[in-house]
Amino acid sequence: MHKRLYWIEIAPGQPSTGLMYSIVIPIYNEESTLPELRSRLVSATASLDADFEVILIDDGSVDRSFELMREIHALDGRFKILQLSRNFGHQIAISAGMDVAQGDAVILMDGDLQDPPELLSQMIAKWKEGYHVVYTVKRSRKEGRIKRWAFTAFYRVLYAVSSIRIPMDAGNFSLLDRRVVDVLRQIPERHRYISGLRAWVGFKQIGIEYDRGARFAGEPQMSIGRLFSLAFDGIFSFSNIPLRFATFVGFAAAAVSFAGGLFVIYEKLFTDKAILGWASTIVTITFLGGLTLMTLGIIGEYIGRIYDEVKQRPLYIISEAVGFEEKNITSTPRIVAPSIDIRSN
Ligand code: UDP
Ligand code: MG
């Protein structure tokens, strides 16, 4: 395992091994879970052999989350806060956290305690065995039946169509080695599906299973619409099969209509049957119209993504950074924020 080259502040009572872990947690309106999140994290990290920092990314919360985070930071400087200028979505919030994380290993987890912090030591043990990516596989979930079913279906569709092997039922909760983080940071993609990118980078990867708990409190902040758009990001950024699908369907429809044409000519020349009714005509027209719209939609999904990429907008904007060293914030290439408010406490 490579060593950190820079000096780190050592919190009192923490052993010094020269290593540091970063725990990156996106937060969007989690005022009801933050106090519990903090105490669970503190106890789960007590037995770690090295220092850690927790990077809380406030993804444009409109409740008291930011104030609570400030209180947490005031109590415990290992908790740092990056406030984004608005809600950018949790994949981008995580990316922002990775950009400023200084740890030798970076752990990504949700802020609603669906990802148990108690798994950290197990993940770190795997990292020490030499794995660069330790992802977690949900053995079970505690969500509504429809949502569970939708997740199951999504992971399988993605597995079937993606050009690389993205492990099934593996979400964001994972540990990434510094090298992997550095590679991910160089990927400029805007529609980020981190579980996919994580698989794409390669290196030595291993999965560990866990039972995904229920949310500690509050409502899910990812609406169904957002989950769908994340699912689309996963599929469209890791597969060109939907585009090919349009071609296959086009060929199939052409073959069917050619056969139909032959049949019509045959009837005309060799039988005296009446002309077939308009119903079949209408059905064919609407069917083909539907197919055309659908394939245009598929093409549109890709074009929309191309458009978003060529606009070259920054991935996110930081409005405030609490507890970081200034150089770690301003040296981050993706940030465009002429006036980030950087506070040391
Ligand atoms: N989250 C975020 N920005 C958003 C939506 C969610 O930072 O726009 C955070 C949220 O606070 C939580 C994590 O991302 O820590 C996962 O969100 P949620 O629990 O709503 O997603 P689900 O578990 O339903 O996939
Ligand atoms: Mg959740």
Image (cartoon, rainbow, N blue to C red):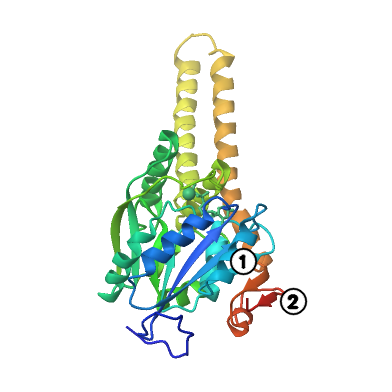
Does the numbered disc 1 mark a residue whose Cβ is under 8 Å from ligand 1? no
> Considering the numbered disc 2 on the image, is that residue within a helix, a strand or a loop?
loop
Label 2 crowd (10 A; few <14 / some 14-19 / many >=20): few
- When asked about the image quadrant of residue 223, the answer is top right
The answer to whether residue 317 is left or right of residue 176 is right
The tag on residue 338 is 2
Residue type beneath disc 1:
Arg
User: Which image quadrant: the C terminus?
Assistant: bottom right
Say if 268 sits above or below 26 in the image.
Answer: above
Percent x, y for residue 167?
A: 34, 56
Residue 27, picture quadrant: bottom right
Q: Amino acid at mark 2?
A: Pro
Say few, some or many: other residues with alpha carbon within 10 Å of mark 1 (under 14 / 14 to 19 / 20 or more).
Answer: some
Q: Earlier in the sequence, mark 1 or mark 2?
A: 1
Q: Position of residue 44 (x, y in %)?
A: 37, 64
On screen, residue 289 versus residue 17, left or right, reads: right
- Side of 133 relative to 270 (left or right): left
- Seen at 54% across and 25% down, the residue is 284
Q: Is residue 299 left or right of residue 102?
A: right
The image's mark for residue 70 is 1
Horizontal and vertical percent position of residue 105 = 40, 75
The residue nearer to you, when weighing 12 against 235, is 12
Q: Is residue 240 at least partly visible in the picture?
A: yes
In the image, residue 292 sits, relative to residue 271, either above or below, namely below
Name the quadrant of the N terminus: bottom left
Say what secondary structure mark 1 lies in: helix
